[in-house]
Image (cartoon, rainbow, N blue to C red):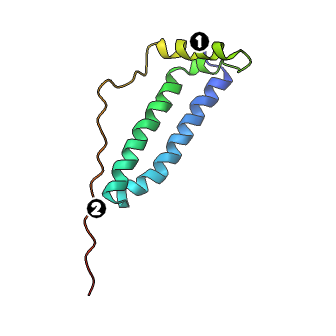
Amino acid sequence: MLTPGNDLLSDHCQEIDSQVLFYGNRIRKKGKDEEKVLFEAFYDVFSSFVNFLKERKETICDWRGTQDGAGAAAFFASECSGAGATPNPNPQPVTVPKAAPAEEKK
């Protein structure tokens, strides 16, 4: 069952995703190759983070920060041990194409 806090988390994640894509689409359409590669890498990391939150929205909002630090570590470990977002065991390196040398103007 979802609580208002969980619904707000979903709405917030969707809003932030829309904002990132609003500015990112400008780069996708008119950006230089280096900017496009960098944006896609950023969006992959961003999407992974948002998916981590969305997959745990029913319990991640339960942390109130009033417990000691060991409680926070245990809560985070329990959230990470559940099904869902897992780290990619074979991440692809991001290569940024080198810019062509500038032409000399006479």
Q: Residue at x 47, y 28 (%)?
A: 51
The image shows residue 44 at horizontal and vertical percentages of 40, 38
Q: Residue at x 64, y 21 (%)?
A: 61
Q: Is residue 23 left or right of residue 6?
A: left
Q: Amino acid at mark 2?
A: Ala
Q: Which residue is mark 1?
A: 74
Q: Residue at x 33, y 49 (%)?
A: 37
Q: Which residue is mark 2?
A: 99
Front in this rendered view, residue 1 or 19: 19
Q: Give whichever of discs 2 and 1 has the lower sequence position.
A: 1
The image shows residue 47 at horizontal and vertical percentages of 44, 35
Front in this rendered view, residue 21 or 38: 38
Residue 47 versus residue 103 in the image, above or below:
above
Q: Amino acid at mark 1?
A: Ala
Q: Which mark is residue 61?
A: none
Q: Circle 2 — which element?
A: loop
Q: Which residue in the rendered view is the most extreme toward the right?
A: 66
Say if mark 2 contacts mark 1, CB within 8 Å.
no
The image shows residue 18 at horizontal and vertical percentages of 51, 44
Question: Which quadrant would residue 76 be assigned to in this image?
Answer: top right
Q: Is residue 49 left or right of residue 9?
A: left
Residue 105 versus residue 81 in the image, above or below:
below
Q: Quote the CA–CA distance across marks 2 and 1.
A: 47 Å
Residue 105 versus residue 29 in the image, above or below:
below
Q: Circle 1 — which element?
A: helix
Residue 45 versus residue 37 in the image, above or below:
above
Front in this rendered view, residue 89 or 18: 89
- How many numbered circles are shown? 2
The image shows residue 17 at horizontal and vertical percentages of 50, 41
- In which quadrant is the N terminus drawn? top right
